Amino acid sequence: MDQNVILRRWSARIRTADEADYIAYIAGTGLDDYRATPGNLGAQMLVRTLGNGESEVTTLSWWASIGAIAAFAGADIDRARYYPEDDRFLLTRPDHVEHHRVVGGTEMAPIG
């Protein structure tokens, strides 16, 4: 059995004007769901302003196993998981996420 931590990465675009509302929305949906799933090792959201009225949002979550990811995402772990209000915010809606084995690096210190 593979003992590597698995990174799950999802990315889409929103209107820059919606950043604050979207960040609050994701904090109470996706990030809370990640963290509540056994086998989740942490989650973060990244925001990058693109300068054209759009921002790119990315969620990163770290998992102990494929089984833990399946408990969060369902049997097809490569399919993106969406929430009821996502259509209100998302300009793009990718069908799939990426999974990467974490094979090296350093532990991050908590912020704040």
Image (cartoon, grey):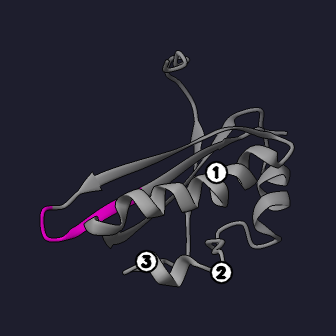
Mark 2 sits on what residue?
84
Q: Is residue 20 magenta?
A: no
Query: Disc 3 on helix, strand or loop?
Result: loop
Q: Position of residue 65 (x, y in %)?
A: 79, 44
Q: CA distance from mark 2 to mark 1?
A: 15 Å
Q: Which residues are magenta?
A: 51-57
* Number of the label disc, if any, that sits on residue 90: 3
Is 9 or 89 nearer to us in this picture? 89
Count residues near mark 3 (Cα–Cα under 10 Å), then give few for <14, some for 14-19, many for 20+.
some
Is 82 or 106 nearer to us in this picture? 82
56 sits to left or right of 73: left
Q: Is residue 55 magenta?
A: yes
Does residue 107 lie above or below 101 as drawn? above
Q: Position of residue 20 (x, y in %)?
A: 39, 57
Which residue occupies 57% across, 59% down? 26
Question: Which badge, 3 or 1, is on the more N-terminal residue?
Answer: 1
Is 49 or 7 nearer to us in this picture? 49
Q: CA distance from mark 2 to mark 3?
A: 11 Å
Looking at the rendering, which quadrant does residue 91 occupy? Answer: bottom left
Q: Marks 1 and 2: in contact by CB < 8 Å?
A: no
80 sits to left or right of 59: right
- Disc 1 marks which amino acid? Leu
Which residue occupies 52% across, 15% down? 109
- Disc 3 marks which amino acid? Leu
Does residue 87 lie above or below 22 as drawn? below
Mark 1 sits on what residue?
31
Residue 69 seen:
yes
Quadrant that contains the N terminus: top right
